[in-house]
Image: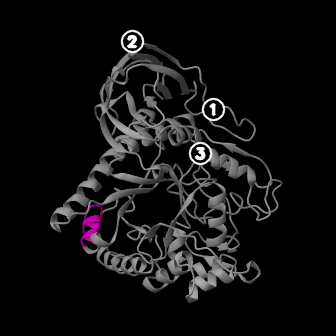
Amino acid sequence: MSLRSQMLIDKSFVLAQIDPRLYGSFIEHLGRAVYGGIYEPDHPTADENGFRLDAMEAIRALQVPIIRYPGGNFVSGYNWEDGVGPKKDRRRLLELAWWTTETNEVGTNEFADWAKLVGSEVMMAVNLGTRGIDDARNLIEYCNHPSGSYYSDLRISHGYKEPHRFKTWCLGNEMDGPWQIGTKTAVEYGRLANETAKVMRWVDPSIELVACGSSSSGMSTFADWEATVLDLSYENVDYLSLHAYYNNNSNDTANFLASSLNLDSFISSVAAICDYVKAKKRSKKKLMLSLDEWNVWHTIGSSRAEERWQIAPPEFEDVYTHEDALAVGCFLITLLKHADRVKMACMAQLINVIAPITTETGGPLWLQTTYYPFLHASVYGRGTVLHTVNSSPKYDAKDYTDVPYLESVCVYDEEQGYITVFAVNRHLTETMELDLDIRSFGDLSLIEHIVLQHEDLKAVNTKANPHHVKPHHDGLSVLDNGHVKSNLAKASWNVIRLQTKQG
């Protein structure tokens, strides 16, 4: 006997407009993300600047609106001047975040060029580990000021007459982490972030700034860190960052698929801290959130490369399973449910390093299982998120209670007339009958029901079998009298798409 669940959807119950940057990603100078990932001059598909065209094609399809760069832990020891100017003059340096050798073949300008080619904006990060206010103001002058000053004219001399006009800037990275170069206390960081934000805005008042929240909700300083940092910088920053990674290293799938409840709680807690500081300061400003690192990361506890000072060694190249794709789908649904506060999010990372895309050096690329829910959410999850009234059977897991078997959200693109329901059936053995009550939309047509499913929860895509886990468009959904009756396969990701007749 199958499970039964319901969703009541009303177009008047609007939660929030979705910021497209919710579907951002991240590329750090780590492992083969840059060298051997997006950049491989000797690859058969490389363009005249050394960028892999096959990687560009796979990334363009994701429609990623913003990409965080250059780190990550890397940024806390990075001197941006080493990555600009003639390549023949750039130095090879020891990179201490990951114990590798950085060739500096790709730097700020090259990455800006590449981001344009894949249709993305750049979320730029400044080094607040080994550096600080002075270098941040110099970097933003180099990147965003038109001309007539030392650093803007230096950019022009490097072949970039027009400024990059990067809008979004991260004020360092994970500055509470003992692994970070230049770790700081909350007071040290809060004061530095505030003063750096001031001078960066003086150079370019149009920018948006992201302050570092805790590196994870598991940090012993979590909550106190956020409150202290914001107490010192609230009026000069626009976003607070969150980082969240999950895994199934205990091989407890039911518990793993429930971990999106942890993400939900984490986001709500940080939003509450922001609102506490707002109330304390009697501020009229509402701070938004940037989940600028999130993903499934099985190798998170592993060390840096065993052999030091290699150039772009393979690191953290997790191979993702079908159940990992389901977890990613649940995380994406959670992000959409918090679209009123989470305006930016970066799946970490984009290629090779805990990524939805894997490349072989000199060879092909293939799409991991996690590519597909991210693709569907990015392409079809634009517009507004609607409040829905859901009814679903629940279960208890090791770390969570009352976990709904149905994890779902509805997105309405009023301009195009599209209604999209994203749904995960968490049940590992039972089909779910889902009743979507969408009568408030009037006359509709059913476009398609996309399904990602596999009998083997541990199934993966590989070079030898790149299409082992991939979605199909034969989902079982029927539209009848204002209701959609859908069968959601066990352990499946579903995308049910409809259109109003006016659309």
**Residue at (57% x, 89% y) in the render:** 150
Sequence-earlier tag: 1 or 3: 3
The tag on residue 481 is: 2
**Helix, strand or loop status at disc 1:** loop
- Tell me the quarter of the picture where residue 61 sits: top right
Is 90 on the left or on the right of 127, as rendered? right
Can you tell which of label 2 and label 1 is closer to the viewer? 2
Q: Distance between the residues labelled 2 and 1?
A: 34 Å
**Residue at (40% x, 76% y) in the render:** 201
Sequence-earlier tag: 2 or 1: 1
Q: Which amino acid type is shown beneath numbered disc 3?
A: Leu
- 222 within the magenta span: yes
x, y percentage for residue 280? 16, 66
Is 416 on the left or on the right of 309, as rendered? left
The tag on residue 340 is: none
Can you tell which of label 1 and label 3 is closer to the viewer? 3
Main secondary structure type of the part rendered in magenta: helix
| Circle 1 residue | 469
Residue farthest along the front direction in this orientation: 502
**Highlighted range, magenta:** 221-231
The tag on residue 62 is: 3
Question: Is residue 338 shown to the viewer in this render?
Answer: yes
